[in-house]
Image (spheres, helix red, strand yellow):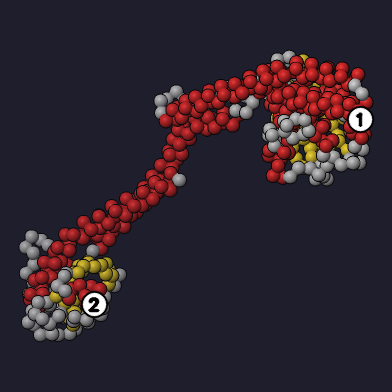
Amino acid sequence: MTCSAFLLLMVLAGTVVYREFRGNLRATIDQQLVDVATVQAKAVEGAAVRTGADGNLLVDLELDPDGGLGPSDLERQILARDGTVLGTTQGLADAEGLVAGRRLVRVAAGVPVFGDAVVRDEPLRFVGTTVADGSGRIVVVATPIAELADAERALLAIFGPVALAGSAFAGLAGASISRRGLAPLARMAAEADAIGAYDLSQRLPVPARRDEIRQLGSTLNRMLDRLEAAVQRERDFAAEASHELRTPLAILRAEVELARAVAEPAAREGLDSALEEIDRLAAVVEDLLLLARAGAAAALDRRQMVDLGALTSAAVQRFDTVARARDVTLVASGTVTINGNASAIERALANLVDNALRHTPRGGAVNILAGPTTGGAVLVVRDSGPGAEAQALPTLFDRYTPAASRPGSAGLGLSIVAAVAASHGGGVRARNLPEGGLEITVELLGGSG
């Protein structure tokens, strides 16, 4: 872009310079031609109209004593008002009238006209003026300008390569300057991409020089400070509220269980329903608490070596009754050890299995796979259900979306999975399998064994 803009600028500047140079070269010649044409027009006034070539038509000219144009430098035509050649010198013999077209209209109005022509491969500069005797005749005086044409070609020959070289240099210099000037912006963009929703502690690198980029970076960092403070207040509130709700829910569950133990059979169905709702509410509280802790990286305060193979086997045992009731085959395979938080990973795995079982039809299968990766491990859960709509995949792990919801979690199920993966330095992704079903992969970093 820089090279193209500079080349365009050079072309425009070159056009202006060339036109000015060309005009200046012709200005002196034009004035001398006008002086000669004026003298010749007066000499022709009243003379009889003759046609054909006449080499003596210039003999009556009073030439410039200061060394201007002489007879040997000049050629001449006498034209009728329609441009027909009435008389000419030998140099213009058999040539058409030099004044033609629009110039005939202008010269008829008493305005001298100028122009360039090529006769027998020789460039000429001419001027035409009217004879003031009412005959409408036009006197045309021309002189060779081969030297002027050579000078113009020399200018073009020099300017063209200079313009191309200058454009190439400007393009390279502009690209280099742009790269150096925009390098801080590129670094800021890379850092901005690395800032996740669960970790707002990072800041953009600000260049040392005091310029607009430094001002932009400082402004964005101040905005990140405000965002981090607001998000932290939200997380603190969610964590404190969830923690405070644990005890009342535990007491409420214990009291309902005691009441159920002594209640009449007719009342037990209602108490069972109450216990289910308490469990659902407790699950929501646990989800909120885990999200708050994962967002603040508190979920990793108690790191330990976690056997993901054992967690997947435990998940199969935990959901075995549900799977058999739905006629779904639940299988786990693979083993790997990772340094992480066992309870958080267990909660994420439970949400994945629960989500897969809910969307797998009768006679289907859910497979859980644990395996090592470079620097960590993966948990993969595949089901044989209908999969997810393509437009829903990008928001599958967002909070409170229909695709991420599950009974009792208020739409937090898969967002819990994303939060746990982020707190372990990893991520999540989902895809529809070619044979049908959904595959969710959870990456966990922390050193596998």
Query: Where on the picture, by quarter, is residue 403?
Result: top right
Comparing 414 with 83, the one in front is 414
Q: Position of residue 173 (x, y in %)?
A: 43, 38
Residue 72 lies, with reference to residue 215, above or below; the image says below
Look at the image and tell me in which quarter the N terminus lies: top left
Disc 2 is placed on an element classified as loop
Q: Position of residue 250 (x, y in %)?
A: 79, 17
Badge 1, how many Cα within 10 Å: few under 14, some, many 20+?
few
Q: Is residue 76 visible?
A: no
The residue at the point 41 percent across, 42 percent down is 170
The residue depicted at 23 percent of the width and 58 percent of the height is: 23
Disc assigned to residue 97 = 2
Residue 144, above or below 48: above
Q: Position of residue 406 (x, y in %)?
A: 77, 34
Please name the residue shown 79% across and 16% down the image: 251
Q: Where does residue 302 sit, x and y in percent of width and height?
A: 73, 14
Looking at the rendered structure, the kind of residue marked 2 is Gly
Left or right of 144 on screen, residue 284: right
Q: Amino acid at mark 1?
A: Thr
Res. 321 mark: 1
